[in-house]
Amino acid sequence: MTIILGVIAVAVVVVVASNVVINHKEQAHQAALQASESRVQSSKKAKESREESREAGLAKDAKGVVNDMIQNDDNLDAKCTDVTIESHDGGNQYSGYASVEDDYDDSTTIDITVTDVTYEDNVSVEISGDQEDKLSETFYSNDD
């Protein structure tokens, strides 16, 4: 009888110890998964933050370029008041729009493509032909 009770006691100890080890391994595995997910999310947020910062800088620089294009190239009596970058098209190209207005309460928005010319540390802006027509229809020539 003592031997049977001893065997049962050893079996109970082995089962309890196995459960403790398995639970410990599972908890360690879950903690590792959470830490890994946290690092991935942190990295993703940092990348998004860098991209948002880059787009904000491009929008600021593009505003001056659009203003120069409207006033000097197109000779229109209007100014660019804001540029919004909506999407990254890949590589160094971005799509967005520019808000343009004049002193007579005329305003419009035009679609633009902004290119980050990294080797020259500036931006290039493209306004398509139909958007140029939209500007010409909305604003008067600059009489200055």
Image (tube, rainbow, N blue to C red):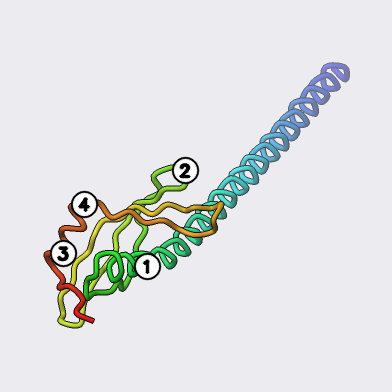
Tell me: residue 20, above or below residue 43. above
Q: Earlier in the sequence, mark 3 or mark 2?
A: 2
Query: Which SS class for mark 1?
Result: helix
- CA gap between label 4 and label 3 equals 11 Å
Q: For marks 2 and 4, give the CA distance.
A: 23 Å
Residue at the spot x=47%, y=53% of the render?
116
Residue 106: image x %, image y %? Answer: 15, 75
Alpha carbon distance from label 1 to label 3: 18 Å
Q: Is residue 80 above or below residue 85?
A: below
User: What amino acid is found at the position of numbered circle 1 in the picture?
Assistant: Lys
Relative to 57, 103 lies left or right: left
> How dense is the environment of label 3, judged by Cα within 10 Å: few (below 14), some, or many (20 and up)?
some
Q: Which residue carries the number 1 mark?
A: 63
Question: Label 3, on which residue?
Answer: 136
Badge 4 local density, few (<14 within 10 Å), some, or many (20+)? few
Q: Nearer the viewer, residue 23 or 59?
A: 59
Task: Find disc 2 in the rendering and name its residue.
Answer: 91
Where, quadrant-wise, is the C terminus in this rendering? Answer: bottom left
The kind of residue on which mark 2 rests is Gly
Work out whether mark 1 precedes mark 3 in sequence or the reverse, and give the earlier one. 1
Q: Indicate the quadrant where residue 111 lies.
A: bottom left
Front residue of 54 and 29 = 54
In the foreground, 58 or 22: 58
Image point 72% across, 34% down: which residue? 25
| Residue underneath mark 4 | 129
In which quarter of the view is residue 120 placed?
Answer: bottom right
User: What SS does tag 2 mark?
Assistant: loop
- Give the SS element for disc 4: helix
